[in-house]
Amino acid sequence: MTLKKRNALAAVEAKVYRGERLTREDGLALIECNDLIFLGLLARYVKEQKTQDYVFFNVNRHINLTNVCVSRCKFCAFGRDAADPGAYAMTVEEALERALNGPPDMTELHIVSALHPDLPFEYYVEVLRRLKEALPSVHLQAFTAVEIDYFTRISGLSLEQVLTKLKDAGLGSLPGGGAEVFSPRVRSLVCPNKASGERWLEVMRTAHGLGLRSNATMLYGHLETPAERIDHLLALRKLQDETGGFQSFIPLPFHPANTGLSHIKRTTAFEDLKMFAVSRLMLDNFDHVKAFWIMLDLPIAQLSLEFGVDDLDGTVVEEKITHAAGATTAQGISKGHLLHLIREAGRTPVERDTLYNVINTYGEEKN
């Protein structure tokens, strides 16, 4: 490491311990740093200032209403054309049946789908309405910003009108998917048919203005540069300064199998852990950084708790999108297994609801 780089990192370290906001240049210095232990030390310090030794999780179930999609992004192995083998679209009754088969202590339904060319907006409204009637105490976290944008196109309604109708039907919050990388260069190459990065941010700004909280994501490890990753984080940080509506940030490693980018190698554990640490350090106004264990493998997700992560997502039950791209993780996990992973890492497990209200704080594991 050159003296210039060493001095830059020393300056960043001093800023972190003083609680000062990091700049774009600081972010570039961090993302180019290969001293993983150093990055983890800083990220862990920031995490502990925010949430002490607590690690959060929830009991949730994923539902993917359809895989028929007009966007057909190059990085996606989930989407299908309507006539393709394996293409499906759930009826409202089928979605309700899956929801009713969730864990007995489930507090969240996580619902994301593809951009179906024929399903009307009222279908999605009816799905939420029926789910909320059947499970009034379960929080409905549904529809990415890309889906919300698509709903405006198929309905002719404004963003506010779409979100208000969904909220009235039972929508509780938005997941963070569809952000990918905001860079127009990257989006033109991998997802030219979906909402732009600016539009994604506009959807979230509007949702936050209506009192809906959301998560945020970044899909990394495909065609983006390190600088484009940092610019993505800075765009999220700027909107969070404005609205305060983001609850957690979730870095998502790209899975190349069965996609139009299958020639790209999957990110390494080293790169994944670095991305978690850098995200924690740059997003000073986000309370939580989440490791979506489905996309990481459980050992890496557990190790991420040393790199700024304070949330392991939830029980999931059934996951289709990442598994279509070759994920070999289980499709779900028990609450007991999550508790064990968190305790084994020397942390205190905290079961939460979607809005981070504490349901239960767990002590040490009993033998």
Image (tube, helix red, strand yellow):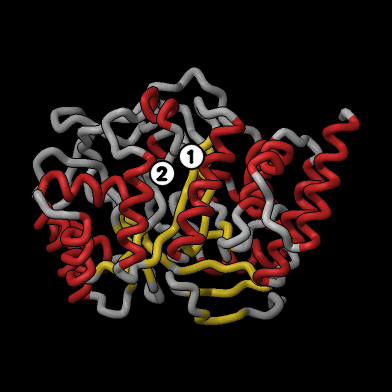
* Amino acid type, residue under disc 1 in the picture: Leu
Whether 345 is drawn above or below 157: the answer is below
Residue that badge 2 annotates: 179
Along the viewing direction, whichever of 337 and 68 lies nearer the viewer: 68
The N terminus: image quadrant: top right
Q: Report how many numbered discs are placed on residues in the image.
A: 2
Question: In the structure shown, which secondary structural element does the residue marked by tag 2 occupy?
Answer: loop
Where residue 111 appears, x then y in whole percent? 30, 57
The C terminus: image quadrant: bottom right
Q: Identify the mark at residue 124; answer none if there is no mark.
A: none
Residue at image point 22% right, 61% down: 163
Along the viewing direction, whichever of 336 and 166 lies nearer the viewer: 166
Q: Identify the mark at residue 219; answer none if there is no mark.
A: 1
- Judged left or right of residue 133, residue 324 is right
Q: Residues within 10 Å of mark 2 (few under 14, many from 20)?
A: many
Residue at image point 25% right, 42% down: 114
* Amino acid type, residue under disc 2 in the picture: Ala
Q: Could one spot residue 329 in this view of the protein?
A: no
- Judged left or right of residue 318, residue 82 is left
Along the viewing direction, whichever of 327 and 230 lies nearer the viewer: 230
Where residue 25 appears, x then y in whole percent? 69, 39
Looking at the image, do the residues carrying marks 2 and 1 touch, with CB atoms under 8 Å apart?
yes
Where residue 226 appears, x then y in whole percent? 61, 32
Q: Earlier in the sequence, mark 2 or mark 1?
A: 2
Residue at image point 47% right, 28% down: 256
Along the viewing direction, whichever of 194 and 356 lies nearer the viewer: 194
